[in-house]
Image: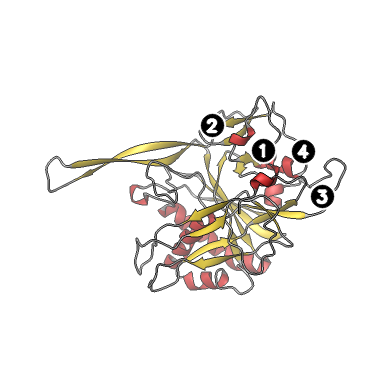
């Protein structure tokens, strides 16, 4: 087990999470772990702890002392995650289109991991958010909606010259927001870094995450923190059990973060279920901002890796050519051990 805590952001307004393609009329639904690491590093710079932070993460020879999951939606006490790819979707149902759900509550994920089937009478998919919702919940919509807001750029020189543009964003329901897990390598790392990381997250809640921060977007109320350990914060008391009379004989790893394999990671890419995503973006640095980062392909959240041990991951320097300092894209794994059950879904493998 690893010491960890959950952080919950309650947005004070719209959030914009840009896609790799850069289209202003589209928005992502996950604030990815590499972007959260980048934002946290910027906060550490402002707090005067950047070099110590990099020494403990991207430069640490034994792997990062601190790793971050991606940010997923929640509503009230219901936290959503991408379901394990090897266990999703369940068998086809005439009542629930399981495959349309991008996020499932932790309770549903715990049932899947423990080998319990999901009742089609207990769940439905909220189309706008892509969240699987319980039928008996008192809330009747998902945690967010995707909307487009209009803005006007006014030319102060030429009279009447106005350019209208539209930007997509997420607007959150009451008592909803985004949550993430911060994992520590051991108790010593937790004792050293828990308070500094929480302080940096408070700063980010104040200054904003994502795009259009100059408009006040991406800000949130005081973050909430829940201490615990992994995998307990995700799986609770659920334990994998026999499926069709057979005990699980092999452990796989369910990713809650983007992942870049390190040379030490023993992943069997012929098995499991995973997909890849290309990550780009632009540099934000006191040394210069606006240049494009190098593109990197990463393993996506919700993927399940067949590995001999807990995957570690790595960080890559994606700085533009000739940039005065490294720019790191973190691909450290926050992975939950789950049973690797047969038969596997070959369609989930993407090479």
Left or right: where does residue 146 sit relative to residue 271? left
Q: Nearer the viewer, mark 3 or mark 4?
A: 3
**Residue 311 screen position, x and y as percent:** 67, 62
Left or right: where does residue 257 sit relative to residue 3? left
Circle 3 is placed at which residue position?
248
Circle 1 is placed at which residue position?
89
Circle 4 is placed at which residue position?
116
Q: How far apart are marks 2 and 1 (CA)?
A: 16 Å
The disc, 4 or 2, on the residue closer to the chain's N-terminal end is 4
Q: Which of marks 1 and 4 is in front?
A: 1
Residues under numbered marks 4 and 2 in contact, where contact means CB atoms less than 8 Å apart? no
Circle 2 is placed at which residue position?
127
The disc, 3 or 1, on the residue closer to the chain's N-terminal end is 1
**Residue 105 screen position, x and y as percent:** 64, 39
Name the residue rendered at 82%, 50% in the picture. Answer: 248
The disc, 2 or 1, on the residue closer to the chain's N-terminal end is 1
**Residue 263 screen position, x and y as percent:** 63, 69
Q: Distance between the residues labelled 3 and 4?
A: 14 Å
């Amino acid at each position: 087990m690893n010491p960890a805590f959950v952080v919950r952001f309650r947005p004070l307004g719209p959030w914009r999470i840009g896609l790799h393609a850069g289209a202003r009329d589209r928005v992502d639904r996950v604030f990815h772990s590499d972007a959260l690491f980048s934002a946290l590093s910027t906060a550490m710079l402002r707090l005067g702890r950047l070099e110590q932070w990099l020494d403990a993460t991207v430069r640490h020879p034994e792997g990062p002392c601190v790793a971050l999951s991606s940010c997923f939606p929640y509503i009230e006490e219901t936290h959503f995650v991408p379901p394990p790819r090897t266990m999703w979707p369940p068998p086809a149902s005439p009542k629930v289109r399981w495959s349309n759900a991008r996020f499932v509550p932790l309770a549903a994920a715990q049932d899947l991991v423990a080998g319990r089937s999901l009742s089609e009478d207990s769940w439905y998919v909220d189309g706008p958010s892509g969240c699987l919702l319980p039928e008996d919940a008192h809330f009747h919509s998902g945690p967010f909606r995707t909307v487009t807001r209009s803005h006007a750029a006014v030319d102060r020189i030429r009279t009447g010259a106005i350019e209208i543009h539209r930007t997509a964003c997420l607007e959150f329901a009451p008592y909803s927001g985004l949550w993430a897990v911060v994992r520590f390598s051991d108790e010593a790392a937790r004792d050293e870094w828990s308070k500094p990381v929480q302080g940096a997250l408070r700063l980010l809640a104040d200054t904003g995450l994502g795009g259009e921060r100059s408009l006040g977007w991406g800000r949130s109320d005081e973050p909430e923190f829940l201490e615990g350990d992994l995998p307990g914060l995700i799986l609770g008391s659920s334990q994998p059990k026999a499926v069709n009379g057979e005990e699980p004989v092999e452990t796989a790893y369910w990713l809650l973060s983007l992942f870049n394999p390190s040379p030490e990671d023993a992943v069997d890419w012929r098995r499991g279920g995973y997909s890849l995503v290309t990550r780009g973006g632009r540099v934000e640095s006191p040394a210069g901002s606006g240049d494009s980062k190098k593109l990197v392909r990463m393993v996506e959240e919700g993927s399940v890796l067949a590995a001999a041990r807990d995957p570690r991951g790595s960080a890559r320097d994606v700085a533009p050519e000739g940039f005065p300092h490294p720019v790191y894209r973190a691909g450290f794994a926050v992975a939950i051990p789950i049973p690797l059950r047969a038969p596997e879904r070959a369609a989930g493998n993407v090479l």
